[in-house]
Image (spheres, rainbow, N blue to C red):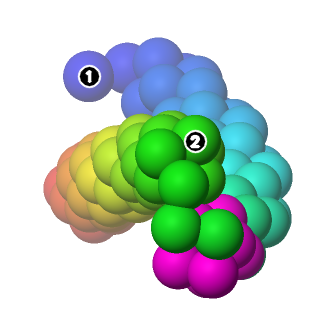
Amino acid sequence: MNPSILQRRLVDVAERVKKVRAELAVTEEQLAFLEEEADEARLRALVSETPIGDVEARDARRHADALARQREALLRTVAELVREQDRLLDRMSAELSAQ
């Protein structure tokens, strides 16, 4: 493969890693907040012993769980992109060694 194409692909993957990691950082901050909110809502529901409190606690937990799933998906994406980056670097190294 043309070295300039490999370099462009490598730069593209590196940019994608950077963007996904930034999104992951934001998601982790949001998740920490939502986890705290879900815990507080659960405690309020226990104290109030009302159906509304239970509904609010379940809703807060659902939101936190959904964001946790998004976080896991972002972690998988970062791992895949890093593997792709490693493959490209290995390929580039092999082609340079062959010259």
Percent across and percent down for residue 85 are: 40, 51
**Do we see residue 7 in this rendering?**
no
Measured in 3D between alpha carbons, the distance from the residue under mark 1 to the one under mark 2, in whole angstroms, is: 62 Å
Residue 1: mark: 1
Residue 41 position by quadrant: bottom right
Q: Which residue is pictured at 54% across the width and 55% down the height? A: 50
**Do we see residue 6 in this rendering?**
yes
Q: Within the magenta stretch, is there residue 63?
A: no
| Secondary structure beneath label 2 | helix
Q: Within the magenta stretch, is there residue 41?
A: yes
Q: Which residue is pictured at 76% across the width and 55% down the height? A: 30
Q: Earlier in the sequence, mark 1 or mark 2?
A: 1
| Residue closest to the eye, 50 or 90 | 50
Question: Mark 1 or mark 2, which is nearer to you?
Answer: 2
| Residue closest to the eye, 52 or 92 | 52
Numbered range of the magenta stretch? 39-47
Whether residue 57 sits left or right of residue 35 in the image: it is: left
Percent across and percent down for residue 43 are: 61, 81
| Residue closest to the eye, 96 or 65 | 65
Residue 52: mark: 2
Percent across and percent down for residue 37 are: 73, 65
Q: Amino acid at mark 2?
A: Ile
| Residue 42 drawn above or below residue 80 | below
Q: Quadrant of the N terminus?
A: top left
| Residue 34 drawn above or below residue 1 | below
| Residue 79 drawn above or below residue 67 | below
Q: Amino acid at mark 1?
A: Met
| Residue 89 drawn above or below residue 16 | below
Percent across and percent down for residue 28 are: 67, 64
| Secondary structure beneath label 1 | loop
